[in-house]
Each structure stands twice: as C-alpha cells, then as structure tokens.
Image: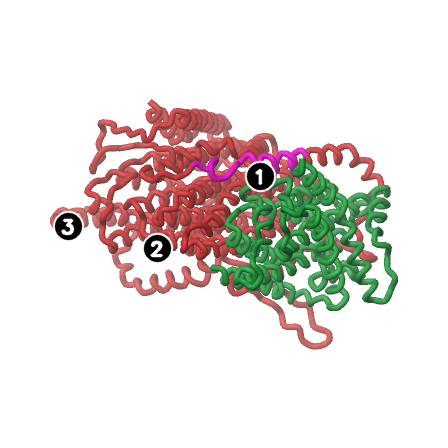
C-alpha cells in the first residue's frame, strides 16, 4: 500500500511539478533584477494557453517536425519514471536502468535536433549543431558521475544507487567523491536543460541560442510539448542531483518527501541565482566547461578507486 | 545430416551465379535464377542453423573421404559458428533480392554477371570459412572469399577511383593472408596437426604464444577493419555497389571478428595482456572510427567509418570477455562476449539497412555527396523512414536493437567495479564509450538531416524518388528485425547463451537472462512503440488540418533565403571538426582574406583517410622506390612467373 502511494505520488509529481520549477527560476531572476516578475504559476498558464492555440508550421517540414515534441515528452517521462523523486524507489527500477535512462534522454535529443534541421533554417541548424556537439561532452560527464555512484553503492539500478548515496558518512573519502560528482552533475544539468552559463533561455538573438532556437518554428501545442519536455528534464536531473547531495532516509517517508520538495525548490532558486549572477559563456568555451565537469567526476572516481 | 545440408547450401550459393554466365547479356533470367538459388539456399541454411540450436549439438564434425594434399577436408560447426552463419545467410539473400532493383542485368550488361558470380562465391566461401575445421582448408576458402571480394569491390572497374580502392583492398587482404599463413604454420608446428577450433597449444612458452596471438590479431584485424589496419575499408565500401557494401560491412567484417574470437582461446586461458590489447585496439577503433565518420561528406564513406566504430565496440566487448576468462570472472565473459556477439548481429542488421538506403539515395539522386542533397524526406518517404530507423538503431537508441547490445557491453564494464581490484581500471572505458555513443548520435543526425531534411540543395536532389519494391522489401525486413530484436531481445538470449558456452566449453559462465532481465527492455520499449504508433496515427489524421495553416520557415525577416543557405552537414560538425583537427588531419585550402574589400576566393576541404593518405601511401611509395632494382625480375610474362614458381618449389623440395 505504502509503495502504491509512493508510486502514484511520484507519477503525479513527475507529471505536474515540472513547470513550477521554471516559474521559481523566473521568480528568482526577477527578484535579482528588482522586478516583481511573472506569477510562479505562469508557466502552467502558458502551457494551457498553448494547448488551446492553433498550429502554424513551416511548409518545408515533414512528419518528423510534428512527431519530435511528442517523442521528447514520452522519452523524458519514461526516463523520469526511473529516477526516484522522493525517498522511495522509482516506479521503474531494474539492473541497468541507468543506461536506459541516459539513452532515453538521447532519444529525445535525436528527435529534437532532427526536427530542428527539418525546417531547413540555418538558425535552427546552429542550435542543433550546438546541442549535439555539447552532448558529446556532457554524456561522458554523466557516465562518470554514474561510475562514482555505482562504485559507492555496488548496485546497477538508479533507484538503489541514488537512495544508498544518502548513507555516505560526511567527511569520508566517499563523501568527497560525491561532492565532486555533484558539481559535475550540476554542470550537466545546466547543459542539458539549456541554462546560463551554457545557454540563455531568455536571449532575444537567434544566433546565440541553443535549445530555444531549435524550437523556433514550433507553435501552439507543439511548442507547449517542447517546453514541458524540457521542464520535466529539469525536474528529473534536479532530483538526481538532490539524491547525490541530500541524506534521505526511506524510513522517514513523510518528512523526506518534504525535504525533497524543498530541495527541488532550492535547486530552482540556485539555478535562478546562477542565471542572474553569471554571464553566459562564449560558445567556444562551453566544451571546456563540460570537460571540466568530466574532470571533476573523473577525479572523484579516482578518489574511491 | 545437418552438416551435409549446410555443405549443399554453401555449394548452392557458390554456384548461384554460374547459370547466369550462359544466358544472354541483357537477359534478366540469369539474375532471377541466381537470386532464387541464393534465397532458397539461405532459407534452408537459416532453418538448419536455427534447428541446430533447438537441438543443441555441441559440435558437429564432418570428415569426407576426399583428402587435401595436407590432410582431410574437415568441417565442423558449433553454436558459436552457428551464430556467425545467421547474418551470412540473411544478408546474402536480402542483398541479392535488392540487387534485382539496384543492379539489374538489363542496365548493367557488362558487369552484372561478374557481380553475381562473385556474390555467390563470396557468400558460400564465408559459410565455409565458418565451417572449416582444417587450417589448409580454412586458408583456401578464406582466399576465395578475399579474392571474390576483390572482384565485387571493383565491379565498376572502368572508374579509376574504383580500381584505386580495389588495389588498396588487394594489398591489405594479402598482407592479412600472409599473417594468417604464418599463424597457421606456427599453429601446425606447435600443435602438431592442422585441426582447427579448438586447437590445443596450451602450455606453450610466452614467446611463441605471443607471436601466434599477434599474427592472428593482425591477420584477422585487417579483415575486421580494426584501426590502424582499416586503411582499405572506407574507400572500398564507398566505391562498391551499395548491396556489395552491405555484404562487406554487414558480413565480411564479421569474419575478422570470428577469427579473432577463435584466436584468443587457442591456448586455454589467455594471458591478461591479450585482453588489454584487444580492449585498447577496440576503444581506439571505436573512437577514431566515429571521429572520422563525423567528418565525412560522402555518406557511404561515413557509413564505412561507422563500421570501424562498431567493430571497435565489438572488440571492446570481446576484450572484456578475454579479461574475464584470464581473471576468472565468468560474468564478464557472459556480458562482454554476449554484448559483442549481439552487437555484431545488430550491426549486420542496421548497417546493411543503411547501406541499402544509401543505395536508394544514389539510385534516386545519383550522388554520394550529402551536401548536394536535402529535402529527400518528401521525395523518398519510404527510404527516409527506413534510414531514420536505421540511424536511430545504430545510435543505440531505445527501443531498437543497437541499444540492447550496447547495454550489455556497458553492463559488463559496470560489473568490473564489483569484486575485482583490476575492475575500476577497466571501468574507465565507460566514459569513452559514452562519448563515442554521443558522437554516433551526432553522426547519424548529420546523415539523416543533411540528406533528407530541409529543401533540396540541387536539382538532382529535387527530382529524386523512392526505389521499387525489390529494393524496399529487403530494407523493410531488416528494419522489422531491428525493431523485433530491440523490443523483444528475449528471443535471442537462448541462442546467445549457447554461443557463449561454445566459445570456451571448459569455462562455465552464467546465462545472460540470469544477469539481466531482458523483459525490462520490452517493458520500456512497448510503451515507446505504442507511443510512436499513437503519434503516427495522430499525425496521419491531423496533418491535413495542420497543413492548411502552413507557412514558410522563420527566416528572421530575410527577404531571399535560398536552399543553399541551409545548414549543411559540414557546418553541423564544424566545432567538433575543429576540436579534433589533429585526429582528422584534413586537407584544407582556405584563402587568405586581405584588405577591406577582399576579392572572390575559394575554400576547399576534404577528409581523406588519414592513415592511408599520410602514412601508408608515403611508406609504400618509399619501399617501392627502394625495391626499384628488383624490377628486373618483373618481365610481365606469365610464363616466366610460372617458371619462378617451378624453381622455388624445386628448391624447397631439395632443401627438404
């Protein structure tokens, strides 16, 4: 019964929570800028409004363009079912799900970049090129983080390794490795969810964007699906990060759901703060940052070798 | 009985092209007959192999009375060999059907018959390579395979670049055979017999054992296309007819892997450094292969380099299995070898699919240059869908087959972290493999997008159209197999377990299903497939409604965007190409821009095979110059050469 509640809670959170994080990020940025900003729930209103709108699409595009946002949503939700959002194991967990998780995210990327190139626009081509290029560096970083976690937890399932990461004693070598993995994971999170300093979601210039420019031609429900998919990605990576950082105890279910939710809000606030306090990197330095992320988790792994 | 059937099958394949020689030049009957024989033989062969597995027979040996000069014609088959036979039958049959549409006799009266003769020869010879249980016999069928391969590659021998690439292949394959002859001679010396697989040279001192391993690795590595022995591969694949490239890439490279798999267990438990060497060569091939693939403009060269990458991944899996064998970790054997074997089969499904798709593009648009294409998705919808599926499969995306085998290899590497002090060192392969995976995704986004997305960049691309059923049919079958293996890998685990057990019968290894629950893949794949079907249904029903509101792509207000202004494949990979410029070793001719009003200038850039262009060719030229004086022996008269052979045989007999 308890598992059933946990699973349904997880599914509901996974489906409904993501846009809130975007709202919190925007609110934080507004606060830093001295503005009042959008309501926190603005992204929900936007999504509802987009769902009702008509679609305008380029006559150059094919079915891939229509399919991509939906494939993104499906793949990212499936990936989300493998990451525990609270102190309980995720609805889908099995030996080897960590690889499935990484490649489901890759499936979304495959279709999003193809759809971007499907429009025949050079702007969208640039976005797609950047997305796939940077992924070549964020993917090894992600797998190095996974290496650290597998080594520490002796299991090959995301749920088990993320929940047992919480049992590491503070001050031990393992905890140092975890901290380094967390730093690395945070950079991966920023890259995968197209945040400053890698990408600026609010820039007005098509030439400099990554994710936003890939969905430039999307409108109505298609745009909504893309925004939703990227917010889900933000949620699951944030939850992933929190599990590496926070000590959660499956025994204290009620309290730990609270900690987790607070943590998610905190991650959103931190992302908002990073966005407000930092300028975005020049595009040619982004791979350098991602290689640095690889090195962080690489050295972390070295510590526990 | 089974063995007799397989021999009949092989002979049928070998002879399939012969009747065609007696038909008229432009008659289609010969081709239809050859195709029918090939398909029938393959169907029988496939049935025998699958039947063979339902009633597992550890090894079946056949010794007919007829004798070779140096022993009997011995044939044998175990479960490992059976696994290698599957792709041979499948691709040989599907490829010859594809040939009906792609290389019809009517349009190719000059070389069609030669192609089909060699197609049958090569397919049959590959079956016999797997069956061979005697080293002399093995070398003979190996040479038949290699030589018929040469004639297949040079089908269009009227074109100079075809002759050039054929020449490189010829040299490479003979260097390989040279190493193999040395290998088998040494094997004969140390084991005392010509009998093959398993050979027994256990207890040999380190020196000779190392020599055996290295000779075998180099000899078979040439055929498999491992870096740095891959120099023949890219141009060879690019210049051959597409179904020949499919046969080469999908099946012949496997023969190299087959050889290496047999070589590493010649002496019982292999030394640790063998596994280390294999793993290093594997990771080098995977990484360099995909980096080079990324930079190609010619889509067939791109596919060829991606074969090098996949062979690299297979070799990494094999390396892990060898390490597992030497360090007594059965789980590494199961996952490493299981992953390697499954990835090999998968590569034999999606790579021929992609090469056949490439043939479809050539058929429709008559170019191999991606950058003159574009917009083919509308013009060749069927090829587009099939190529997209093949690309997703080769980029190891769920729910397709490439993912399953890469998952096994990843799992194998992750398993090294438990219960072994050496493990964490091996685990460093994982991030590199992840990077290779991301680069493969990038490569295939580039391939599909540049060829199919956007608008046509040339008029040739604008006039392209889907090929006929003879070409699409085999591709649909291969695509279906990719989905089937990807969504229901349980179908193959039994066969895989038998093959793994047959590799080293004296070493128990756990069954794959016991290590990893393959149903989970199905559990994730089925929702994905249903979701995709739902999306397809939605698009089918709503598309017209959507189309009515269609406008042009957002062009930022620019008044006259042209199709040449679209992002090309080269622009897509520009950052990566710059970062890996020292590996790519491109030849670039960039103009110097001077002054405020620079004059018109040209920029040219191509990516030749770096090792061939910068290393092999100069070295071979130098050697050629050094041996200039030996030219005296080369008169060009065949009779004189026969005389040399006679003399040498006489001298050898005298010495004996």
Residue B467: assigned label:
none
Q: CA distance from mark 3 to mark 2?
A: 40 Å
Q: Earlier in the sequence, mark 3 or mark 1?
A: 1
**Which chain can be seen in green?**
A
Residue B118 vertical position relative to residue B204 in the rendered view, above or below: above
Can residue B73 be seen here? The reply is yes
Q: Are marks 1 and 2 in contact (CB under 8 Å)?
A: no
Q: What residue does disc 1 label?
A: B400
Label 3 close to label 1 by CB (< 8 Å): no
Q: Which residue is mark 3?
A: B651
The residue positioned 83% from the left and 64% from the top of the image is A31
Q: Residue at x 76, y 61 (%)?
A: A272
The Cα atoms of the two marked residues, 3 and 1, are separated by 59 Å
Badge 2 sits on which subunit?
Answer: B
Tell me the SS state at disc 2. Answer: helix
Q: Colour of chain B?
A: red
Residue B463 can be seen, yes or no:
no
Is B513 within the magenta? yes
**What residue sits right under mark 2 in the picture?**
B273
What range is drawn magenta here?
B511-530
């Amino acid at each position: 019964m308890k598992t059933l509640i946990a699973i349904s809670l997880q599914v509901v959170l996974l489906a409904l929570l993501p846009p809130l994080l975007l709202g919190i990020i925007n609110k934080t940025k507004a606060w830093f800028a001295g503005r009042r900003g959008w309501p926190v729930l603005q992204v929900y209103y936007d999504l509802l409004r987009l769902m009702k709108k008509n679609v305008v699409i380029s006559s150059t595009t094919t079915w891939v363009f229509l399919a991509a946002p939906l494939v993104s949503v499906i793949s990212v939700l499936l990936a989300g079912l493998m990451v525990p959002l609270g102190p309980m194991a995720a609805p889908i967990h099995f030996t080897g799900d960590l690889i499935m998780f990484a490649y489901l995210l890759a499936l979304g990327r495959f279709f999003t970049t193809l759809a971007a190139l499907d429009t025949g626009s050079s702007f969208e081509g640039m976005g797609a090129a950047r997305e796939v290029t940077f992924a070549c560096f964020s993917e090894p970083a992600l797998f190095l983080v996974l290496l650290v976690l597998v080594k520490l937890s002796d299991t090959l399932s995301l749920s088990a390794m993320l929940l047992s990461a919480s049992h590491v004693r503070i001050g031990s070598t393992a905890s140092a490795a975890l901290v380094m993995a967390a730093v690395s994971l945070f950079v991966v999170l920023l890259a995968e969810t197209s945040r400053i300093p890698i990408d600026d979601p609010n820039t007005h210039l098509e030439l400099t964007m990554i994710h936003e420019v890939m969905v430039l031609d999307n409108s109505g429900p298609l745009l909504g699906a893309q925004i939703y998919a990227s917010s889900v990605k933000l949620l699951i990576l944030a939850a992933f990060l929190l599990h590496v950082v926070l000590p959660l105890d499956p025994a204290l279910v009620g309290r730990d759901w609270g900690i987790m939710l607070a943590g998610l809000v905190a991650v959103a606030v931190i992302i908002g703060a990073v966005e407000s306090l930092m300028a975005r990197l020049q595009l040619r330095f982004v791979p350098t940052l991602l290689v640095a992320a690889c090195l962080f988790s690489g050295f972390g792994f070295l510590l526990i070798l | 009985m089974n063995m007799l059937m397989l021999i009949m099958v092989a002979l049928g394949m070998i002879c399939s092209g012969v009747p065609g020689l007696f038909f008229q030049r432009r008659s289609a009957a010969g081709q239809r007959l050859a195709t029918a024989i090939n398909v029938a033989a393959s169907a029988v062969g496939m049935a025998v192999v699958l039947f063979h597995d339902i009633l597992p027979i550890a090894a079946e040996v056949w010794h007919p009375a007829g004798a070779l000069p140096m022993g009997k014609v011995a044939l044998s088959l175990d479960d490992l060999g059976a696994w290698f036979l599957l792709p041979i039958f499948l691709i040989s049959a599907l490829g010859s059907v594809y040939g009906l549409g792609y290389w019809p006799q009517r349009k190719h009266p000059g070389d069609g018959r030669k192609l089909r003769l060699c197609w049958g020869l090569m397919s049959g010879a590959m079956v016999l390579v797997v069956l061979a249980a005697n080293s002399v016999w093995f070398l003979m069928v190996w040479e038949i395979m290699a030589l018929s391969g040469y004639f297949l590659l040079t089908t269009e021998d009227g074109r100079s670049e075809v002759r050039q690439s054929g020449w490189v292949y010829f040299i490479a394959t003979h260097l390989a055979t040279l190493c193999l002859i040395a290998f088998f001679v040494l094997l004969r010396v140390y084991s005392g017999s010509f009998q093959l697989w398993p050979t027994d040279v256990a207890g040999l001192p380190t020196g000779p054992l190392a020599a055996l391993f290295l000779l075998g690795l180099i000899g078979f590595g040439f055929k498999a296309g491992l870096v740095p022995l891959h120099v023949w591969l890219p141009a060879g694949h690019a210049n051959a007819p597409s179904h020949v490239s499919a046969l080469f890439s999908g099946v012949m490279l496997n023969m190299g892997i087959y050889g290496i798999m047999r070589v590493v267990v010649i002496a019982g438990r292999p030394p640790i450094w063998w596994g280390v060497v294999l793993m290093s060569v594997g990771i080098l091939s995977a990484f360099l292969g995909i980096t080079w693939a990324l930079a190609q403009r010619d889509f067939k060269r791109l596919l060829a380099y991606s074969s090098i990458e996949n062979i690299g991944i297979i070799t990494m899996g094999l390396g892990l299995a060898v390490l597992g064998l030497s360090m007594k970790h059965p789980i590494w054997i199961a996952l490493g070898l299981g992953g390697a074997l499954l990835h090999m089969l998968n590569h034999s499904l999606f790579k021929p699919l992609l090469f056949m798709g490439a043939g479809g593009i050539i058929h429709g648009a008559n170019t191999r240059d991606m950058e003159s294409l574009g917009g083919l998705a509308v013009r060749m919808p069927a090829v587009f869908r099939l190529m997209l599926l093949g690309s997703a499969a080769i980029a190891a995306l769920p729910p397709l087959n490439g993912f399953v085998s890469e998952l096994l290899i990843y799992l194998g590497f992750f398993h090294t972290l438990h219960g072994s002090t050496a493990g964490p060192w091996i685990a460093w392969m994982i991030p590199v493999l992840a990077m290779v995976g991301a680069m493969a995704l990038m490569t295939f986004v580039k391939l599909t997008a540049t060829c199919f997305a956007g608008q046509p960049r040339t008029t040739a691309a604008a006039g392209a159209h889907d090929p006929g059923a003879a070409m699409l049919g085999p591709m649909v079958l291969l695509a279906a197999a990719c989905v089937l293996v990807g969504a229901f890998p349980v179908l193959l685990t039994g066969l895989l377990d038998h093959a793994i057990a047959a590799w080293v019968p004296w070493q128990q290894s756990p069954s794959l299903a016991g290590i990893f629950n393959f149903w989970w893949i199905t559990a994730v794949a089925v929702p994905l497939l249903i979701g995709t079907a739902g999306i397809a249904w939605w698009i089918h029903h709503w598309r017209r409604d959507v189309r009515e509101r269609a406008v042009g792509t957002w062009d930022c207000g620019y008044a006259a965007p042209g199709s040449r202004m679209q992002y090309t494949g080269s622009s897509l990979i520009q950052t990566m190409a710059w970062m890996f410029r020292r590996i790519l070793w491109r030849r670039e001719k960039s103009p110097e821009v001077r002054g405020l009003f620079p004059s018109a200038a040209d920029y040219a850039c191509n990516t030749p095979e770096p090792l061939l262009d910068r290393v092999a060719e100069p070295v071979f030229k130098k050697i050629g110059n050094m041996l200039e004086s030996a030219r005296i022996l080369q008169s060009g008269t065949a009779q004189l050469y026969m005389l040399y052979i006679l003399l040498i045989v006489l001298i050898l007999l005298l010495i004996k």
